[in-house]
Image (spheres, rainbow, N blue to C red):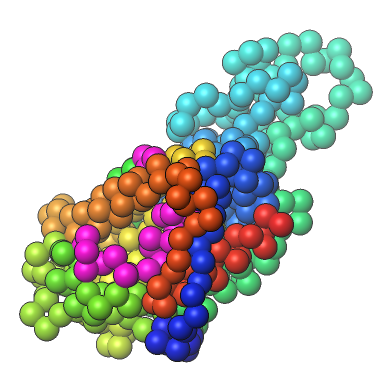
Amino acid sequence: MTASPSTTSSVIPTLPGRYYTDPELFALEQKNIFEAMWFCVVRSSDLPKPGSFKTVQVGTENLIISRARDGSIRAFYNVCRHRGATLCTEESGEVKRAFQCPYHAWTYDLDGKLIAAPNLSKMTDLDRVQYGLVKAHVREWLGYVWVCLAENPPSFEQDVQGAVVERLGSLELIDNYGVAELEVGRRIVYDVKANWKLIVENFMECYHCATIHPELTEVLPEFADGYAAQYFVGHGAEFGEQIEGFTVDGSAGLDRIPGVSEDQDRRYYAITIKPQVFINLVPDHVILHRMFPLAVDRTVVECDWLYLPDVVASGKDLDKSVELFHRVNEQDFDACERCQPAMSSRTYAEGGVLVPSEHHIGAFHEWVQDRIG
């Protein structure tokens, strides 16, 4: 169990305002955080068959995430090896057998090997594997595709799965939700005009919950006291006595996930996996956020609501279930957008101060500074 907030009484400063506005600092974050760590990019089911692809932005690089002929997932830099043209210009789609550059028609199979080009037969000394598409490292977990651009990736078990163990106490407790087997019941994409760190900081604390989340604190009364569930290993915020489900009006939810234990029932767990994933666990569904920091003051957030396949296939009404966290998202992102302009104010040049219940945000700030040197 982590230290109780009540034991932390010393004043903790925030990051200075420039950390949220300086393009040079953002460039360091792109290099040393987003391009150096495991980064969650797509839901595996978004690539239903060989040739399916999505393009995603990871730091300064654009990648093609695609399914190969053997069913495995591949990640390629979206750069033709001939003259550097962008290979796939669409956000998503499907190719039958190969990717072809729209500039000079250099063509690559689903494994990334160069297989055709005008006059290629005259270039007998060109190694088609060496001049194939450049690959990034790939892992699949929880039904999502994670990539790493580092030449030697950090330990996935330590950095990604370790964040879940640190929060829940063991991987078994997230395995109970069978996240990989759930299906996307709803996906909402938010374009947030705020620095990515403001969003992480907001998600990590609940000091603001009583102020801006009336629906959430009705369902989870302890959040009204300002203490987030992420303080304590294995702790889940308990539903209110009269609350039937994790819905916008507290009415009954949908079919409970069978693996959820009695101890996990009627509880909410929040997990932060640095640098860009939030996982929210409740008895009948899972909500997973993926952040894509695109600029120092712009972050796109893709949020998936995941349910049992039978729930999605049945056409049951998901609105009350989705609406609760959709409102939370809108309330949070509005708050982050209201903070962003003040980050460049002279009055915030030295930053602000954290209250005791936000001490773990101070640890996040130290982590950022360590990562970017």
> Residue 211, relative to residue 78: is it above or below?
below
Query: Could you tell me which residue is drawn at 11 percent across and 69 percent down?
Result: 250
* Outermost residue toward the right in this view: 125
Query: Could you tell me which residue is drawn at 61 percent across and 24 percent down?
Result: 86
Can residue 216 be seen here? The reply is: yes
Residue 10's x, y, as percent?
50, 80
Residue 218 lies left or right of residue 18; in this view the side is left
Q: Which residues are magenta?
A: 191-213
Residue 20 lies left or right of residue 331; in this view the side is right
Residue 22's x, y, as percent?
57, 42
Residue 358 lies left or right of residue 188; in this view the side is right
* Outermost residue toward the front in this view: 347
Camera-nearest residue between 49 and 292: 292
Query: Could you tell me which residue is drawn at 52 percent across and 24 percent down?
Result: 89
Residue 133's x, y, as percent?
71, 34
Can residue 50 be seen here? The reply is: no
Q: Is residue 322 magenta?
A: no
Camera-nearest residue between 142 and 343: 343
